Image (cartoon, grey):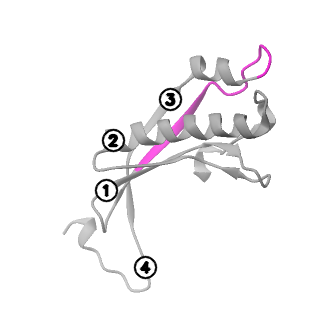
Amino acid sequence: MSWKDLDIEKINTIEKLVAEFEVSALSFFEEVYEGDQIPFGSFKVRIYEQKESNTFIGYTNLKLKDPLGGFEGAVGYGLKIEDALVDIIKNFKNNVCDYMDICKRKLNKDDFSLVSYDEF
């Protein structure tokens, strides 16, 4: 029996962790950080396979401050693991650039939150 065939009472969904990536983005962060110090030069991406739709969804562990002061990570989708990875990296970069446009400044360490490995 496949994990996709499981039907457990009162369980809404099951997702399977299928990939994890370490994304080094020093070249990108050099352009967005204020000053010479780069507090976060890389981040992790986890990709999950979704049972119901046979698609993949990914999340970052590096979160960006939102306009309300909370922190929000990027999300990406795809029909393949690689598609979800590309989508999430593009979304993360777009979110950072959009936030810089709103703030009208380069970013600093306080604009980001790194979620610990066991929490994302």
Sequence-first tag of 3 and 2: 3
Which of the two discs, 4 and 1, sits closer to the camera?
A: 1
Disc 3 on helix, strand or loop? strand
Q: How packed is label 2: few (under 14 Cα within 10 Å), some, or many (20 or more)?
A: some
Sequence-first tag of 4 and 2: 4
Disc 1 on helix, strand or loop? loop
Q: Are marks 3 and 2 in contact (CB under 8 Å)?
A: no
* Distance from the alpha carbon under mark 3 to that under mark 2: 15 Å
For residue 73, above or below residue 22: below
Identity, as a three-letter code, of the amino acid under mark 4: Ile
Residue sitting at x 73%, y 25%? 39
Find residue 23 and name its label: 3
Sequence-first tag of 1 and 3: 3
- 36 in magenta: yes
Residue sitting at x 40%, y 39%? 85
Residue denoted by label 2: 83
Q: Are marks 2 and 1 in contact (CB under 8 Å)?
A: no
Residue denoted by label 1: 55
- Across and down, in percent, residue 99 comes to 69, 40
Identity, as a three-letter code, of the amino acid under mark 1: Thr
Quadrant that contains the N terminus:
bottom left
- Across and down, in percent, residue 56 comes to 35, 52
Disc 4 on helix, strand or loop? loop
Magenta extent: 34-47
Find residue 11 and name its label: 4
96 relative position to 9: left or right: right
Sequence-first tag of 4 and 1: 4
- Across and down, in percent, residue 78 comes to 34, 49
Which of the two discs, 3 and 4, sits closer to the camera?
A: 3
